[in-house]
Image (cartoon, rainbow, N blue to C red):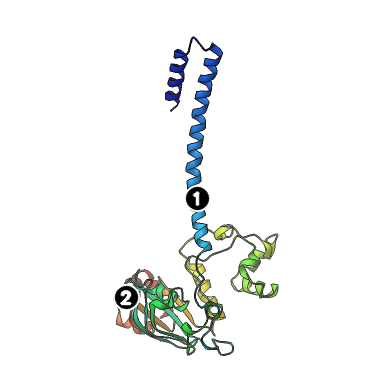
C-alpha cells in the first residue's frame, strides 16, 4: 500500500510539476507515507476490536444465562437436619446430557447404606462422573428418569439450594479463589478462626500456615500455585494422609469416591464397577478380588504390592 500511494503521489507531482513547488511535492510524499502507517494502524485496531468483541459477546451470554430451575422452590418440606443418616438409593435411574443424546446412565439400581464408604471404578467413559452429575442435579430434570433418594427423600422434589448446601463434592480439579486463605476455607463466614485452625491442623497444614506472615489472611494465587504445583495425580504420601483423614474425621458421613488406583478404595465398604453406563458388579473389595474381574485384574497389576497391606 505504501508503494502504491507513493507511486500515485509521484505521478501527480510529475503531472503538476509546472504548478507545484518542490516543497509541496516533498510534503505530499511525506503525508503519503504517513497515511500508510495510519491505514495499517487502523487495520490492526479493527482486528483487535473484533477479537475483543468476541469476549464481550461471551460476557453478554453469561449475563443472559437462565437461572437453574428450582433453585429455591421446594415441592416438599425437608425433615429437620436432613440428611441425618446418608442413605442413597438409585432406582432405575437414567441420565442424558441432552434429550437427543444417548443416556449416560442406563437405568442403574444401587443402594448405599448409611455412613458407608463406596469406591467407584471403571474405564474412561463408563459413567462414573455421571453419577455425581445426577446426585448434584447438574442436568435438567426433564432429561432424567427414575429416582434418587437420600434418606428417603426424592432429590428432584427439593430445591437445588437445599440439596447442594447439604452435600459436598471435591472434583479432580478443585477451584481455589484468588483471595485470602480464610476466604477459601470459609467463603460464607460460617466458622470461627479456631475451627479453621482445627481444620488446618487435621490436614497437617497448621504449622506451615502459622509460619506465614499473614496467617489466614495470606493471599492464595490462582490454582493455589503459591502453595503447591497443580497436578492431576496425588503422590503416595498425600494419598495416605487423605485416607487417614477420611477414616478418622468422616466416620459419620457417606462417601463416594471415584478411584483410579485400587489401594485408594480397598478399605471401602463396597466397590462399584461401571461399564458402558451401567453397574456391572458391586460388592466388598474381598468379593471382587475373589471374582477376579478384568478391570480389577488390570488395576491390580499397578497396586499389587500395596494391596497386601489391606488384605
Which mark is in front, 1 or 2? 1
Secondary structure at numbered mark 1:
helix
Image quadrant where one finds the N terminus: top left
How many numbered marks, from 0 up?
A: 2
x, y (%) of residue 13? 47, 15
- Name the residue tied to disc 1: 53
Q: Is residue 266 visible?
A: no
Sequence-first tag of 1 and 2 = 1
x, y (%) of residue 284? 39, 84
Q: Is residue 165 visible?
A: yes
Secondary structure at numbered mark 2:
strand
Image quadrant where one finds the C terminus: bottom left
- Name the residue tied to disc 2: 275
Q: Residue at x 51, y 62 (%)?
A: 62
* Disc 2 crowd, CA 10 A, few/some/many (<14, 14-19, 20+): some
Mark 1–mark 2 distance (CA, rounded to whole Å): 44 Å
Name the mark on residue 301: none
- Would residue 173 appear left or right of 197 to someone viewing this image? left
Disc 1 and disc 2 in contact, CB within 8 angstroms: no
Q: Is residue 299 above or below residue 221?
A: below
x, y (%) of residue 308? 40, 77
Q: Quadrant of residue 268?
A: bottom left
Q: Residue at x 59, y 71 (%)?
A: 203
* Disc 1 crowd, CA 10 A, few/some/many (<14, 14-19, 20+): few
- Considering every residue shown, the one lying at the far front of the view is 19
- Would residue 115 appear left or right of 129 to someone viewing this image? right
Q: Quadrant of residue 280?
A: bottom left
Q: Nearer the viewer, residue 92 or 26?
A: 26
x, y (%) of residue 304? 37, 72
- Considering every residue shown, the one lying at the far top of the view is 18
Amino acid at each position: 500500500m505504501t508503494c502504491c500511494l507513493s507511486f500515485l503521489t509521484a505521478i501527480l507531482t510529475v503531472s503538476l510539476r509546472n504548478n507545484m513547488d518542490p516543497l509541496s511535492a516533498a510534503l505530499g510524499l511525506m503525508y503519503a507515507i504517513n497515511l500508510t502507517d495510519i491505514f495499517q494502524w487502523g487495520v490492526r485496531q479493527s482486528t483487535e476490536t473484533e477479537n475483543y468483541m468476541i469476549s464481550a459477546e461471551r460476557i453478554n451470554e453469561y449475563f443472559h444465562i437462565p437461572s437453574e430451575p428450582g433453585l429455591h422452590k421446594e415441592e416438599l418440606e425437608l425433615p429437620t437436619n436432613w440428611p441425618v443418616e446418608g442413605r442413597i438409593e438409585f432406582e432405575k435411574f437414567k441420565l442424558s446430557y441432552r434429550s437427543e443424546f444417548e443416556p449416560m446412565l442406563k437405568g442403574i439400581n444401587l443402594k448405599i447404606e448409611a455412613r458407608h464408604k463406596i469406591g467407584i471404578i471403571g474405564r474412561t467413559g463408563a459413567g462414573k462422573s455421571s453419577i455425581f452429575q445426577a446426585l448434584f442435579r447438574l442436568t435438567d430434570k426433564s432429561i432424567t428418569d427414575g429416582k434418587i433418594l437420600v434418606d428417603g427423600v426424592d432429590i428432584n422434589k427439593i430445591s437445588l439450594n437445599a440439596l447442594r448446601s447439604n452435600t459436598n463434592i471435591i472434583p479432580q480439579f478443585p477451584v481455589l479463589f484468588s483471595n485470602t486463605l480464610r476466604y477459601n476455607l470459609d467463603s460464607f463466614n460460617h466458622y470461627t478462626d479456631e475451627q479453621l485452625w482445627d481444620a488446618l491442623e487435621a490436614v497437617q497444614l497448621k504449622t506451615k500456615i502459622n509460619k506465614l506472615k499473614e496467617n489466614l489472611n495470606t493471599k492464595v494465587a490462582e490454582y493455589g500455585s503459591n502453595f503447591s504445583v497443580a497436578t492431576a495425580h496425588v503422590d503416595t504420601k498425600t494419598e495416605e494422609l487423605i485416607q487417614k483423614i477420611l477414616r478418622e474425621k468422616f466416620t459419620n458421613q457417606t462417601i463416594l469416591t471415584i478411584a483410579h488406583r485400587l489401594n485408594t478404595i480397598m478399605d471401602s465398604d463396597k466397590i462399584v464397577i461401571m461399564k458402558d453406563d451401567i453397574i456391572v458388579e458391586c460388592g466388598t473389595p474381598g468379593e471382587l478380588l475373589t471374582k477376579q474381574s478384568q478391570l480389577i485384574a488390570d488395576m491390580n497389576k499397578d497396586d499389587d504390592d500395596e494391596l497386601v497391606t489391606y488384605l
